[in-house]
Amino acid sequence: MGAAALKIAFVALSLALDVFAVSVGVGMRGAGIALKVRIGAAFASAEIGMTLIGVLIGKVAGLYLGEAAAYLGFAALVGVGAYMIYESRRGDAGAGFDLSRGWGLVLAALSISLDSLGIGFSILFIGVPLGVSLACIGAASVGSTALGLTLGKALGKRAEESAGAWAGIVLMATGLGFGALHYFHAGM
């Protein structure tokens, strides 16, 4: 597997774990095919849309901040990852919302796609093709949504909490790893 493919896999995995965690929570009540399609489409659209917004912000920041913009993007990944770990330990996120429809679904899609904003910001600086990255992010989002919704009832609350923490850990490692690779000009 080439360096670009490995980087894309890390990006897609870090985003998919967060989607999986939220999907497990929704799936604990059970989910039919129509619900899986609706949630999968919403989550994938949010992930791709926020990645593109992050790319635009990264381009503008790159013009004004130069090389520092790359490190700002990598630091954003670490910060979002740390926040995801914090939120997974807090426990009651999403209580009272129906995350499967309406405003609850919109809020869930936006909340899980904040990390995509950081990915989009930094993706310009890791040397991967944007189109392929977006396709992989979308596919990973749909797949992890379907898996989380399907397994949610069986896995329960504990899996939702640990998946959120793991998503944060992977995102932090991704930001630190890409920052180190960029600093040492390795694989960039």
Image: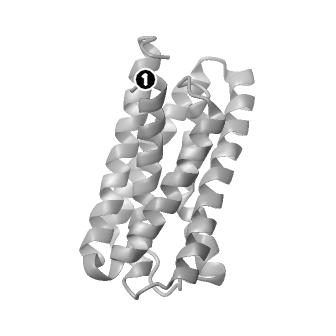
Q: How many marks?
A: 1
- Residue 138 higher or lower than 5, as above or below: below
| Residue 150: % across, % down | 39, 76
Asked if residue 42 lies left or right of residue 20, the reply is: right
* 19 w.r.t. 160: above or below: above
Q: Is residue 63 visible?
A: yes
Q: Tell me, what colour scheme is on the image? A: one colour
**Residue at the (62%, 67%) spot, across then down:** 41
Q: Nearer the viewer, residue 126 or 86?
A: 126
Q: Secondary structure at mark 1?
A: loop
Q: Mark 1 Cα within 10 Å, few/some/many (few <14, many 20+)?
A: few
Residue 85 position (above or below residue 105): above
On the image, the x and y values in percent for residue 29 come to 40, 88
- Can the viewer see residue 19? no
Circle 1 residue: 2
Which residue occupies 37% across, 41% down?
Answer: 172
Residue 3 relative to residue 157: left or right: right
Q: Is residue 23 above or below residue 46?
A: below
- Amino acid at circle 1: Gly
**Quarter occupied by the N terminus:** top left
| Residue 97 pos. (x, y %) | 52, 84
Which residue is situated farthest in the top direction here? 185
Q: Residue at x 61, y 44 (%)?
A: 134
Q: Name the spot of residue 155 as percent of width and height, x first.
A: 26, 76
Which residue is drawn at the image coordinates 37% and 28% (left, top)?
A: 177
Q: Nearer the viewer, residue 153 or 125?
A: 153
